[in-house]
Image: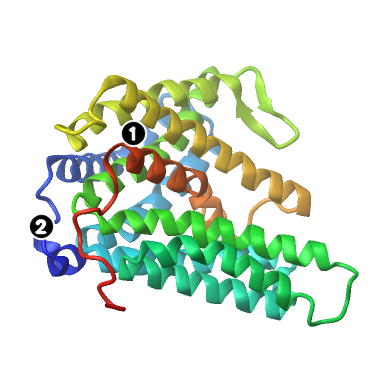
Amino acid sequence: MSTSDRLFGYRHAFDHPVVLGVTVAVAVMLALSLPVIALLFKSGRISEKLRGELVARCVSWMILVPVILVPVLLGAAWFILFVGVLSMLCYREFARATGLFREQAVSFVVALGIIAITFAVLDHWYGFFVALPPLTIAILAAVAILRDQPKGYIQRVALGIFAFLLFGVCLGHLGYFANDEHYREMLVLIVAGVQLNDVFAFCCGKTLGKHKLCPNTSPNKTIEGSVGAILLTTTLVAALGHFVFRGTVMDSPFHLIGLGLIVSVGGQLGDLMLSSIKRDVGIKDMAALIPGHGGILDRFNSVLLVAPATFHYIGFFIGIGLEQEWRIISG
């Protein structure tokens, strides 16, 4: 695939059957979701409160799915820019929730770091990409000195580093997938796996859940929901992964099951991580932008840990973007 086709080749959006199949399946599920919820409510199987919650979630998904999927289908450049904007929005919510926005110099460096990460990804400049985390951390530590206020220094530097690593570096790995010729099918596999992992955990928890998983962190999550999600997500990712990675070293039961476990366990840990942050600062949601979900960060928390883990797991076995042109902007 040429660089221009990879960056802007929307005509190749459905070349891979997994991309087409998952897109059609998601569209069908969304179309049937509201009628199914109505039938469950009329039959008395769900309460009015649960119906309202499910309807809000489904309506939100009808908006979120195109927002996530369209950049993937349009081309790598659009998806990388989407991830860059997503990183900024997630950082904005985090900074407001933790009070980091008051530290203007630190916030400026974090934002600049996210922009630099986005440029490195778009440029397919891996050397710059891996150099940015230590460089940005060093700059954050230096800039925070300039206020000449030792009290609170550790907190503001630590929060700035934590935010940059989560929303710049971790999400940047999700964007870097777009530098591979087969990025669409890999991204569809990972993003669909992460999001369905949340759905599986919710459904299994509501129907089978009896034992609390982390009651002080997230009271509604259960061990049964977690185990159910691990089993279902690992099976789904391994099955779809066979078609995504066919003919490569990744196409073995051991590697595919490992990928599925990373997606499911990493997704749940990302969710619990954000719950811990919210409990620590004393809020329920990061924002109220998405009905039934909270803020943008509440919806995309599950991918924060999964993105770098899957990137390096897949990269270890088959590499990411090795055959594509490097430094396409900086030359």
Frontmost residue, 48 versus 206: 206
Say whether residue 221 is visible: yes
As drawn, 113 above or below 258: below
Tell me how the rendering is colored. rainbow
Between circles 1 and 2, the one closer to the viewer is 2
Residue visible at 68% across and 68% down?
96
The quadrant where residue 172 appears? bottom left
- Residue 165 vs residue 325: left or right? right
Q: Dot 2: few (<14), some (14–19), or many (≥20) neighbours within 10 Å?
A: some
Amino acid type assigned to the residue bearing label 1 in the image? Val
Frontmost residue, 14 versus 120: 120
Mark sitting earlier along the chain (1/2) = 2
Residue visible at 21% across and 58% down?
73
User: Distance between the Cα atoms at labels 1 and 2?
Assistant: 34 Å
> What secondary structure is marked by label 2?
helix
If the image is split into quadrants, where does the N terminus sit? bottom left
Say whether residue 45 is visible: no
- Residue 184 vs residue 286: left or right? left
- Residue 116 vs residue 148: left or right? left
Which residue is label 1 attached to? 36
- Residue 256 vs residue 134: left or right? left
As drawn, 212 above or below 321: above
Q: Position of residue 162 (x, y in %)?
A: 65, 57
Amino acid type assigned to the residue bearing label 2 in the image? His
As drawn, 228 above or below 111: above
Q: Position of residue 245 (x, y in %)?
A: 21, 35
Q: Position of residue 277 (x, y in %)?
A: 70, 50
Which residue is label 2 attached to? 12
Q: Dot 1: few (<14), some (14–19), or many (≥20) neighbours within 10 Å?
A: few
Residue furthest to the right in view is: 151
> What secondary structure is marked by label 1?
helix
Residue visible at 21% across and 29% down?
242
